[in-house]
Image (cartoon, rainbow, N blue to C red):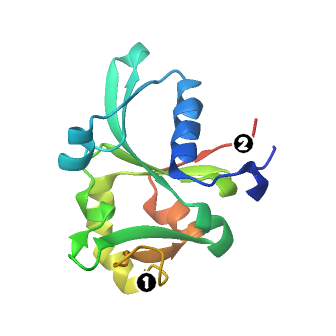
Amino acid sequence: MSKFTESDQWTSGQQIENFLDDFFSKHGYLIERTTPYEERVLCLGDRHYRFPPKNTHWTIEYKSGIQTFYTGNVFLETISVDSSNKPGWVYTCRANLIFYAAILNNEILVFNPTRLRNQIEDLKTTFKVVKTSKGQNAGYNTHGVIIPLKYVEDNVAGLVIPIKAA
């Protein structure tokens, strides 16, 4: 199996979104962006996924974990903006599923947002809660719990989808 590497230039969230759209389109899903209202107000995620053979529809939130490769941890955001105490996506996501693309680890972690919310308080007492490094965001920090990837694969994600470089 080919492996993704740092040189594959995963430098922006848009590149990750494009990768996920392409990956799942090749598996028969029809994918449409959610509207700004659906994404920002209703918190329904980034995409609508339709699978015509089974007449199914889901809303999907995209997250990426490039740092997972370097740290061995998954970051689950619990506070988005600490200066206004804005809740993180663990609490606000109302999509059907969250796709957490750990591209350099060659996998996509699939979370059920309701299940994740039910687990997060226990995870916060078991694992370290951190804030983003100084200067990453202008005027605020993002906070979250960092959990070893292996633990997430075995106990938190509902599904782990392997991916490979083309």
Assign the C terminus to one quadrant of the image: top right
Q: Is residue 141 above or below residue 151?
A: below
Residue at x-position 37% and y-position 78% = 141
Nearer the observer, 32 or 105: 32
Most distant residue in the top direction: 53
**Viewer-closest of 23 and 85:** 85
Outermost front residue: 138
Please state which of the two labelled residues, at mark 1 or mark 2, is closer to the viewer: 1
Q: Assign the N terminus to one quadrant of the image.
A: top right
Between 133 and 91, which is closer to the camera in this rendering? 133
In the rendered view, does 47 fall on the left or right side of 103?
left
Q: Residue at 44% of width from left, 62% of height from top?
A: 156
Q: How many marks?
A: 2
* Image coords of residue 11 (percent x, y): 62, 55
What percent of the width, then of the height, locates residue 12? 56, 52
What is the spatial separation of the Cα atoms under label 1 and label 2, in whole angstroms? 31 Å
Image coordinates of residue 38 in percent, x first then y, are 23, 39
Q: Which residue is mark 2?
A: 164
Q: Residue at x 55, y 37 (%)?
A: 18
Vertical placement of residue 140 versus 99, above or below: below
Three-letter code for the amino acid on which mark 1 is drawn: Val
Q: Which residue is mark 1?
A: 130
Instruction: Pick whichever of labels 1 and 2 is earlier in the sequence.
Output: 1
Name the amino acid type tagged 2.
Answer: Lys
